[in-house]
Image (tube, helix red, strand yellow):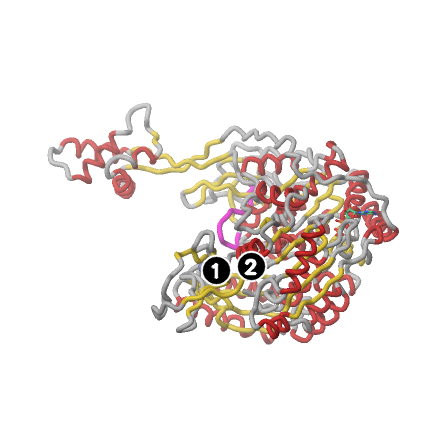
């Protein structure tokens, strides 16, 4: 008997691989241990998922190195990784790679050696007088191998004249041999960022909880005390003090000797929250921030600190759901409805849903917090799967902001022009400037103009890789694709018809800022979007300046709408509520409602009263109406009717399957084949819509066809998709041509 290991490797395949434990080891490495294995002439780092006994090990390749003395991943994390892979139909090795920190302690190095045949060939070449250019290069390469220098890296040899081609030829004729070895680096000893700069420290006063906060906290505390899995949906209006409830729950978990994981939707929110937690919980809690934008070394160091047990509280974004905390007692997911919890690349998991599964494996309590719960979560609460805890009022009797809808159609009737900033909004801004308070202006589009249009033929200038119009960025003076980052100079004539009647359409954040500067030359104006802030530092600088009162107006995209707690904001202006509504997406109304509620929540958070002005062309739309009244229940009822009638989540399980290829004929052919594979599933109760051209029919050079698959039951969907993907493989449709997105957030 011998032991074999099932190893997950970071390759785009939905399978694992079998390796034998090194002969030198007494026992095979445990599940969760990282190992280096040979894979197609390369060294790869993988994770052992299981050990199995086998009769013999003939023909099974051996693990070349075991990286961890103790498993990197705990048993619940290995189970979670397997769940993610099967639920989201994701390549298992890629899931495990996403769970682990970047590997900084080993690197694979390629080395070359000269074979006996190589030595003979060199002697032959040296004996001839007349060598070709190719042969001269080969001689130079082969001569580099001398006693004491038998193993060489390819890089310096490739720099010899004709060296690269010579190496390739010598490898082919067996004169050289290549192999990959792993080299161990000393573990990067990264110092923790000591004290973060104190430019924007939230004060951390302890508030006496109001009765509603208390009731919610008591319920959660009881769950933590019981040490059982239980999901609480904390539905609290903006400014109702949800953070204070999270804090109390975390304290309880630590008191109970357990750890806590807090997920937030944006990197920007991790910093403020971790400082608040630091201030409240003290150094001993070892509050640690984990997110994917940390430099590799830092992220790895933080991850291992958590693994060693130095941290008892982790704050992070979606990927922190895999933080290697042990004895997990509490998981908090703030703003649980946020789209950013869904990873848009493979593995396409939702951090919130993975958090629920993890909590179940670990016997932990869960708090999902939101002012605007997702339809999925609220429906779960209604069905009694989650416990609903409500905070219906703002803290300290602060009133909700007053929201006014501004009908842009009336503006147009009066002025016969459409302006980004209507009369009403400009007057309201002027009032705030005169009173010395602050305003936030939300415009949910980056760039200067949405697109450039030809008056003669009507065509918009398109991306060359994607079927989408390019956005005009004035400062860069280029047209830019917001999907693939392709950019080009602004054409003076139409690329289609060569006429010179080009004009720009629609106002973006850059233009709104310009208009505000022209209208209010003395105001201090800042802008917050992905064009003005690229780093955390820049982000904090702008927000810090606003919080410190160094800016009067802050214009920005939805980056503005989330979480931040500014006390002197008395006006929030929404340039257009309609942008999200127009998208071909069943969540369009939900997104619009969420955005309006959140943005309205930014006004009047201090002692000062706040107003919200929302400009729209559809003031009667239910999402806009309910958003203006901040009436979640009214919105839920309406939206639930629509979803139920259309068989959309939460009343059906949904998957979006894309077939793609650079070659249009290939993708069309494979889409037809997949249609044939999926067809029989309809008899089992599935609804298969498609294939149709995807809303983004071309993206990053790929031609895309789309299937929407709806299922009354979850298991049916998972089984059908698994069968379909397996069948695609058998029909020779390449891996990576068929992309399944389970529980999609967007259908673009
Ligand atoms: P939410 O996340 O629900 O929108 P926050 O947690 O940000 O609200 O709380 C809003 C503000 O109210 C914060 O400044 C917080 O410090 C304060 N706060 C929280 N609880 C109380 C309380 N019981 N009494 C007074 N102020 C409170
Ligand atoms: Zn593009």
Give the secondary structure at mark 1: strand
**CA separation, marks 2 and 1?**
9 Å
The answer to whether residue 217 is visible is yes
Question: In the picture shown, does residue 477 fall above or below 293?
Answer: below
The answer to whether residue 632 is visible is no
Tell me which residue sits at (76%, 36%) in the image. 281
Q: Is residue 681 magenta?
A: no
Q: Quadrant of residue 286?
A: top right
Between residues 626 and 422, which one lies in front from this camera angle? 422
Between residues 94 and 190, which one lies in front from this camera angle? 190
Coordinates of residue 208 in the picture (x, y in percent)? 86, 44
Cβ–Cβ below 8 Å for labels 2 and 1? yes
Quadrant location, the C terminus = bottom right
Tell me which residue sits at (59%, 68%) in the image. 585
Between residues 523 and 32, which one lies in front from this camera angle? 523
Coordinates of residue 344 in the picture (x, y in percent)? 56, 56
Q: Circle 1: is it few (<14), some (14-19), or many (20+) Cα within 10 Å? A: many
Tell me which residue sits at (50%, 62%) in the image. 450
Quadrant location, the N terminus = top right
Q: Earlier in the sequence, mark 2 or mark 1?
A: 2
Coordinates of residue 692 in the picture (x, y in percent)? 50, 72
Q: Circle 2: is it few (<14), some (14-19), or many (20+) Cα within 10 Å? A: many
Give the secondary structure at mark 2: loop
Between residues 228 and 636, which one lies in front from this camera angle? 636
Coordinates of residue 93 in the picture (x, y in percent)? 54, 49
What numbered label is drawn on residue 253?
none
| Drawn side of residue 447 relative to residue 382, left or right | left
Residue indicated by mark 1: 471
Q: Which residues are magenta?
A: 1-15
| Drawn side of residue 674 relative to residue 331, left or right | left
Residue most extreme to the top: 148
Residue indicated by mark 2: 445
């Amino acid at each position: 008997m011998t032991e074999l290991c099932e190893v997950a490797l970071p390759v785009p395949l939905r399978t694992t691989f079998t390796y034998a434990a090194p002969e030198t080891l007494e026992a095979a490495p445990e599940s969760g241990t990282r190992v280096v294995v040979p894979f197609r002439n390369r060294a790869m780092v993988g994770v052992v998922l299981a050990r199995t006994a086998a009769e013999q090990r003939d023909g099974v390749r051996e693990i070349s190195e075991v990286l961890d003395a103790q498993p990197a991943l705990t048993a619940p994390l290995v189970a979670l990784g397997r769940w993610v892979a099967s639920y989201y139909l994701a390549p298992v090795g890629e899931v495990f790679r996403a769970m682990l920190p970047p590997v900084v302690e080993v690197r694979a190095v390629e080395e070359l050696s000269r074979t006996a045949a190589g030595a003979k060939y060199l002697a032959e070449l040296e004996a001839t007088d007349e060598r070709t250019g190719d042969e001269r290069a080969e001689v130079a390469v082969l001569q580099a191998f001398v006693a004491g220098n038998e193993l060489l890296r390819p890089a310096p040899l490739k720099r010899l004249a004709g060296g690269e081609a010579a190496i390739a030829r010598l490898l082919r004729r067996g004169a050289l041999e290549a192999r990959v070895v792993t080299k161990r680096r000393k573990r990067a000893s990264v110092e923790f960022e000591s004290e973060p700069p104190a430019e924007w420290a939230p004060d951390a006063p302890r508030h006496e909880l109001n009765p509603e906060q208390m009731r919610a906290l008591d319920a959660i505390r009881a769950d933590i005390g019981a040490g059982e899995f239980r999901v609480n949906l904390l539905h609290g209006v903006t400014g109702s003090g949800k953070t204070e409830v999270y804090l109390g729950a975390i304290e309880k978990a630590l008191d109970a000797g357990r750890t806590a994981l807090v997920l937030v939707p944006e990197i920007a929110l991790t910093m403020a929250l971790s400082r608040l937690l630091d201030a409240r919980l003290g150094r001993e809690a070892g509050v640690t921030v984990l997110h994917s934008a940390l430099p590799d070394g830092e992220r790895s160091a933080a991850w291992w600190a958590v693994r060693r047990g130095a941290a008892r509280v982790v704050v992070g974004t979606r990927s922190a759901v895999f933080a290697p905390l042990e004895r997990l007692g509490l998981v908090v997911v703030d703003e649980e409805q946020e789209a950013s919890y869904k990873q848009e690349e493979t593995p396409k998991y939702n951090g919130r849903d993975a958090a629920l599964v993890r909590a179940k494996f670990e016997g932990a309590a869960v708090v999902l917090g939101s002012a605007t719960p997702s339809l999925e979560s609220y429906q779960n609460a209604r069905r009694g799967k989650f416990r609903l805890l409500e905070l219906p009022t703002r803290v300290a009797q602060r009133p909700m902001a007053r929201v006014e809808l501004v009908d842009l159609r009336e503006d147009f009737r009066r002025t016969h022009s459409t302006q980004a900033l209507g009369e009403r909004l400009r007057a309201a801004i002027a009032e705030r400037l005169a009173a010395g308070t602050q305003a936030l202006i939300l415009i949910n589009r980056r760039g200067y103009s949405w697109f450039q249009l030809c008056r003669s033929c009507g065509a918009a200038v398109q991306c060359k890789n994607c079927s989408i119009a390019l956005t005009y960025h004035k400062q860069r003076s280029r047209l830019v694709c917001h999907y693939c980052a392709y950019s080009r100079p602004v054409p003076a004539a139409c690329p289609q018809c060569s006429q010179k009647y080009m004009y720009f359409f629609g106002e973006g954040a850059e233009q709104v800022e310009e208009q505000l500067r022209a209208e209010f030359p003395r105001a201090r104006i800042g802008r917050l979007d992905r064009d003005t802030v690229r780093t955390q530092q820049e982000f904090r600088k702008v927000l810090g300046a606003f919080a410190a009162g160094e800016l009067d107006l802050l214009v920005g995209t939805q980056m503005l709408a989330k979480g931040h707690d500014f006390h002197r904001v008395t006006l929030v202006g929404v340039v257009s509520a309609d942008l999200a509504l127009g998208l071909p997406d069943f969540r369009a109304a939900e997104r619009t409602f969420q955005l309006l509620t959140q943005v309205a929540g930014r006004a009047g958070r201090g002692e000062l009263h706040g107003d919200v002005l929302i400009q729209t062309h559809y003031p009667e739309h239910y999402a806009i109406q309910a958003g203006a009244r901040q009436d979640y229940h009214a919105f839920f009822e309406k939206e639930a009717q629509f979803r139920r009638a259309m068989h959309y989540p939460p009343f059906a399980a949904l998957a979006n399957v894309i077939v793609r290829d650079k070659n249009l004929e290939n993708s069309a052919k494979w889409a037809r084949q997949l249609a044939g594979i999926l067809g029989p599933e309809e008899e089992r109760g599935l609804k298969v819509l498609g294939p149709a051209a995807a809303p983004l029919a071309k993206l990053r050079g790929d031609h895309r066809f789309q299937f929407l698959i709806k299922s009354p039951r979850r298991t049916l969907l998972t089984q059908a998709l698994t069968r379909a993907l397996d069948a695609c493989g058998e029909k020779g449709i390449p891996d990576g041509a068929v992309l399944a997105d389970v529980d999609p957030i967007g259908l673009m």
